[in-house]
Image (cartoon, grey):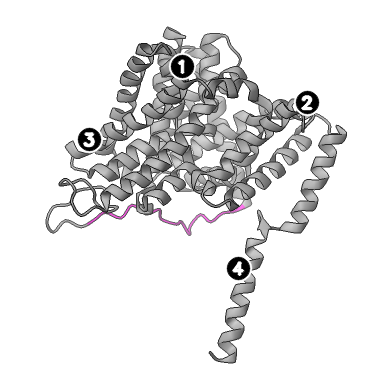
Amino acid sequence: MSTKESVVLNTNVEMARERKLTIAGINIYLFIGIVTIILIGIYMEVLPDNMASGLVVTMVLGLALKWIGDQIPVFNTFGGGAILCIIIPALFLYLGIFPQSFGALTESFFTSFADLAISGIVVGSILSMDRQMLLKVGTRYFIPLIGAIVATMAVGGLLGHLVGFGFTETIFFVVGPVMGGGMTAGAIPMAEIFAASSGESAGTILERIAPAVLVSNMICIILAGVLNGLGKRKKKPKYFSGDGEMLRLKDGEKRMDFGKKESHAHPFSINNLMIGIIFATTIFVLARILASVIPGLHATVWIILGAAALKIFCALPPQIEKATEHWYDFISKALVPAILVMISAGMIDFAGVVKIITDPSYLSLTVITVIIATLAAGFLGLIIGFYFVETAIAAGLGMADMGGSGDLAVLSAADRMELMPFLQISSRIGGAITLLILSFLAPLLL
C-alpha cells in the first residue's frame, strides 16, 4: 500500500470513528455535558412548566435513549432505541429515580405539543407517498392490506371472546393498537378517539394500548426472520417467495421501480419547512372545523381523509407536497424520540403497564393478532398474483410493527429492504384505515 493510500485509509477510519462518537451530530462528550445539565435541572426541580423546558428535556433524553438503544447488539434489531424511549422514563418515575415534577412537565408539554406533531406526521406521511405506486399497485395491494385488518378484527375478537378477555376489549385494546401503524401516528390519535367515546382520559387508554404496540413490534421482527429463512429453503411451495420481488411477473415483463425519487426542484430549506408547518396545521384547523360541524367523525379522521383526497386528486402543487414531507422528515428524525419520552413519562403509569403485560390472555392475543395478520396478508397476496412471503411481510408485518423504526427492523430481519415502499403504505395508509374503522366502531361499542 502506498503512503498516499495509507493516509486516505487512516483518514476514512478516523472520520468513521468521529461519526460514531456523535449523537444527533453533536460530539458525544459535549452531548454528555448537555444531558448532565438537563438531569441537574430535573433533580433540582427548577425547570418552569413551559415549552422551552418541555422541548429540551424530552428532546435531549429522547435522543440519548435512542442512541443507547441503537448501540446494543441484538436489542437494536428490535427497534431498541424507540423501546428505551418508551420504557425508561416511565420506569424511572415508577422507581422514584426521577421526581414526579418531571412527569408533570412532560404531560403538560405533550398536551400542547401533540396536535402539532401528529398533524405534521399524518399530513406529511400521506402527501409524501409515491402516487405512481398508489395508482399502479395500490388497488391490488389494498386487498391483502384491508383483508389483514378485517381478519385480525374478526378472528382476534372471536378468540378474545372465547378466552374470556372480551370481543370488544380485544378489538379496541389489542387488535387496534397492533394494526394502527405504530405509536405516534397510531396509538396516540387512537387513544384520543377512544377517549371521546368512552369518557376515559386519553392517558389512561394509552396506558392500556401501548404494551400491544411494543410486544407486536418484537413479534414482527422475529416472524420476519422466520419468513426469510423459510423463503431461502430449496424445497418450498410454488410462488412462496419472490426473493424480494412482490409481483409475480409474466415472461418478458419488466419490474416496476418504485424507489423514492429525490426532488432537486424543491430542496430542503427553512422556507419549505415553514410552508410545511403552515399547511399541515391548516389541515388540522380545517379538520377541527369539520369535526364540529359533523361530530360523528373525530378530527384526526378528517385530517387523514383530507390529506388522502389531496394526494389522490393531485390538488396541491409539488412544492406544497414536498414542504409537508420536509416537516414530516424533521418530526421523524428530531422529534419522535422526544414524543416517545413525553408519552412514557407524561401519559403512562408503569405499574399499570406491568399489570397488563403480565396478563397471559393479553400477551397471547397480541401474538395471535400478528400471526393472523401475517397469514391473511400472505394468502390473499397469493390469490391476487403476489408472492406469499413478500406480501406477508409488507401487508402483514408492515401493519403490525411499530411504524418507521419497526419497518426498518422488520426488513432488516427479512433481508428485503426493497419492500420499504410497500411497508410505508401499510404503516401510513393501512394505519389510517384502521383508525377510520375504529372511529366508526368506538361510538357504538365503547
The 10 Å Cα crowd at callout 4, few under 14, some 14 to 19, many 20 or more, is few
The residue to which callout 1 is attached is 297
Name the residue type under label 1: Leu
Decide if residue 249 is on the left or right side of residue 417: left
Labels 1 and 4 touching (C-beta < 8 A):
no
| Circle nearer the N terminus (4, 2) | 4
- Front position among marks 1 and 3: 3
Q: Secondary structure at mark 2?
A: helix
| Circle nearer the N terminus (1, 4) | 4
| Circle nearer the N terminus (3, 2) | 2
* CA–CA distance in space, label 1 to label 4: 50 Å
The residue to which callout 2 is attached is 100
* CA–CA distance in space, label 2 to label 1: 36 Å
Mark drawn on residue 379? 3
User: Residue 340: x and y, percent?
Assistant: 61, 35
| Circle nearer the N terminus (3, 4) | 4
- Front position among marks 1 and 4: 4
Q: Main secondary structure of the magenta part?
A: loop
Magenta-drawn segment: 255-269
The residue to which callout 4 is attached is 16
* CA–CA distance in space, label 1 to label 3: 33 Å
User: Residue 64: x and y, percent?
Assistant: 68, 47
